[in-house]
Image: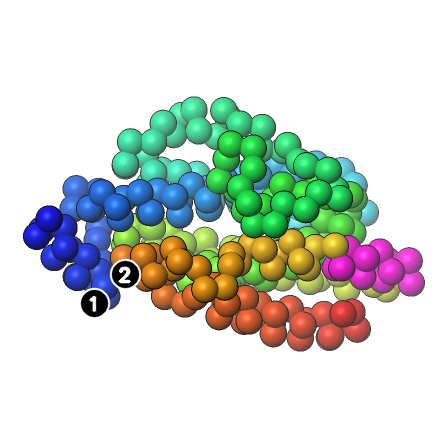
Amino acid sequence: MTETMAIEDYLAQGGILSSPANVPPRYRGELLRLMASFVDSELAGSAGFAGVINEAPGITERIAAARIVLEKADHAGRVLALMGDFGADTGRYAVHHPWAARVARGADLGAMRQGGDMRLSVFHYPLTGWVDAVVMNLMMGRASVIQLGELAKVSYQPLAEAFRTILPRETRHAELAEEGMQRIIASPEGRNAAQASIDYWRPRVVESFGTAGSARYATLARFGLRHQPNETLLAQWEGDIAARLDALSLT
C-alpha cells in the first residue's frame, strides 16, 4: 500500500510511467479502459467510413475517404500494440467484433456504451450517404483533435507518444472534411443536406465528451490520465466548431 500510494503521489505531481512493470493495479485498469475506448472508436470509425467510399462523388474524395479508413485502422493498431504489453490478445482483438454494426438512425443512446465494445456512443450511429459522412467527419474530427490534445499529455509515456504521432493525422482528417464541405455547400441542395446532418450529429458529438462534473475525472486526474475536465473540452469544441460552421455560413 505504501509503495502504491507513493506512485499515486508521484503521478499526482506530474510524474510519468514508462513500463507496465511499475504500473499500480487501479492505474492499469483506467489506462486499459482509456486505450480500449480509443482503439474501439477508431476501428468503428474506420469500418463505418469504409462503407461510403464508393459513394464519394469524385476521385479526390475517394482518395480522402480511403486515407481516413486506412489511417484510423493504423491508429487503432498503434495503441492496440501498447495494450498487448499489458496482456491483451492483439491477434484476436480487431476481428472478434462487428465494428461496422450500427443502431437505428433515430436511436438515442446518450453517452452509454453499447454492444459489447468500448467505442464512444457517436460511433454506433449510421452514416446515410456521402454528405452525412463528411459532416460527421468534420464534427467528430474536430472533437477528436481536442480530445487527442488532452490524451497526448497522459502520464503513461509510450501512450502519450503514440497520441502525439496520431494527432496531426487526425487533424488532417478534419481538414479533409472541411475541404469536402466547401464543395458540398456549393449547391443549394448540398447546403440543405449538410445543415440537416449538422443538426443530427451535433448532440451526438456532444455526448462524446462525457458528462459535466464527472466523478471519474478526479481519479483520472490524480493518475495523470486527464488534465482538463469534460466541460472544458466541450466548451473548446463548441467554440471551434461554431467558428468553422460560421465561416461556411452554416449553423
* Horizontal arrangement in the rendering, residue 157 relative to residue 164 (left or right): left
| Residue 164 sits in quarter | bottom left
| Residue 112 sits in quarter | top right
The amino acid at mark 2 is Arg
Residue 156 seen: yes
What range of the chain is rendered magenta?
Answer: 188-199
In percent of the image, x 58 and y 46: which residue is there?
121
Asked if the magenta segment contains residue 47, the reply would be: no
For the rendered model, the colour scheme is rainbow
Mark in front: 1 vs 2 = 2
In percent of the image, x 40 and y 58: which residue is there?
215
Residue 222 is tagged as: 2
Q: Horizontal and vertical percent for residue 175?
A: 63, 61
The amino acid at mark 1 is Gln
* Majority secondary structure in the magenta region: helix
* Camera-nearest residue between 106 and 131: 106
Residue 13 is tagged as: 1
Q: Secondary structure at mark 2?
A: helix
Considering only order in the chain, which callout, 2 or 1, is on the residue closer to the N terminus?
A: 1
In percent of the image, x 37 and y 51: which residue is there?
162
* Camera-nearest residue between 86 and 7: 7
Residue 138 seen: no
* Badge 1 density bin: few <14, some 14–19, many ≥20, Cα 10 Å: few
| Residue 10 sits in quarter | bottom left
Q: Quadrant of the C terminus?
A: bottom right
* Badge 2 density bin: few <14, some 14–19, many ≥20, Cα 10 Å: some
